[in-house]
Amino acid sequence: MFIQTEMTPNPATLKFLPGCEVMPEGTANYTRPEEAGHSPLALRLFGLEGVAGVFLGSDFVTVTKMQDREWDSLKPIILGSIMDHFTSGQPVVSETAPAVAAGEGGEDDEIVAQIKELIETRVRPAVAQDGGDIVFRGFEDGIVYLHMQGSCSGCPSSTATLRHGIENMLRYYVPEVQEVRPVEY
């Protein structure tokens, strides 16, 4: 098994591509080991000293390291753990684990439906290339609330991505949108 790695805009995260499907649908974001009970892969990665977060996408695994760790020492251990997991035959996520569906959250009136479609077709594919995800969490009083996951969470460029990328695009296509704000949950 050959696992590719890619840098992300967030220096605390690396994207690992095992060359096979990771999540058949949705995504899974774990920011603490206690949240990873439904994922043998995430539990295995959290068992490594220095891993602070695990994000599972369709064909990639994004790992966030603790600030006091260096990728030079952590990356080979993570590669070995991912390889061991996929050769073990264990599932990535147990069937009882709730995956986050694309664009989950909020009511589906016409404006919300437009916002969700734009996020799904234009935003999520772009941020997935960088090892992250952005999930719609609501629209209220002209403000779109988005939850950033994987490499997007805590990324130094995330504010610029929200303001200059996503917000401008949404305001252009949906005049009712006045602002985009990140939410944590």
Image: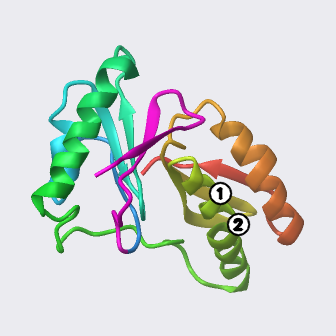
Residue 15 appears left or right of 125: left
Q: Position of residue 99 (x, y in %)?
A: 33, 68
Residue 20 lies in quadrant: bottom left
Q: How many marks?
A: 2
Q: Secondary structure at mark 2?
A: helix
Tag 2 and tag 1, C-beta contact below 8 Å: yes
Drawn side of residue 158 relative to residue 70, left or right? right
| Mark 2–mark 1 distance (CA, rounded to whole Å) | 7 Å
Residue type at mark 2: give it: Arg
Q: Amino acid at mark 1?
A: Ala
Name the colour scheme. Answer: rainbow
Residue at screen point 71% across, 59% down? 143
Label 2: how many Cα within 10 Å (few below 14, some 14–19, many 20+): few
Viewer-proximal residue among 119 and 130: 130
Against 48, residue 2 (above or below) is below
Q: From what the image shows, is residue 142 above or below residue 36?
A: below
Q: Main secondary structure of the magenta part?
A: loop
Residue 158 visible in image: yes
Does residue 5 belong to the magenta stretch?
yes
x, y percent for residue 93: 22, 64
What residue do we see at 73% from left, 38% from top? 160
Q: Kindly give the residue lying farthest to the front in the view shown.
A: 1
Picture residue at 66% right of the left edge, 81% below the top: 113
Judging from the image, what secondary structure is the residue with disc 1 in? helix
Which residue is label 1 attached to? 126
Instruction: Name the residue that disc number 2 marks.
Output: 122
What mark, if any, has residue 157 been given in the picture?
A: none
Label 1 Cα neighbours within 10 Å, binned few <14 / some 14-19 / many ≥20: some
Q: Is residue 35 visible?
A: no
**In the depicted structure, whether residue 83 falls above or below residue 146:** above
Q: Which residues are magenta?
A: 1-24
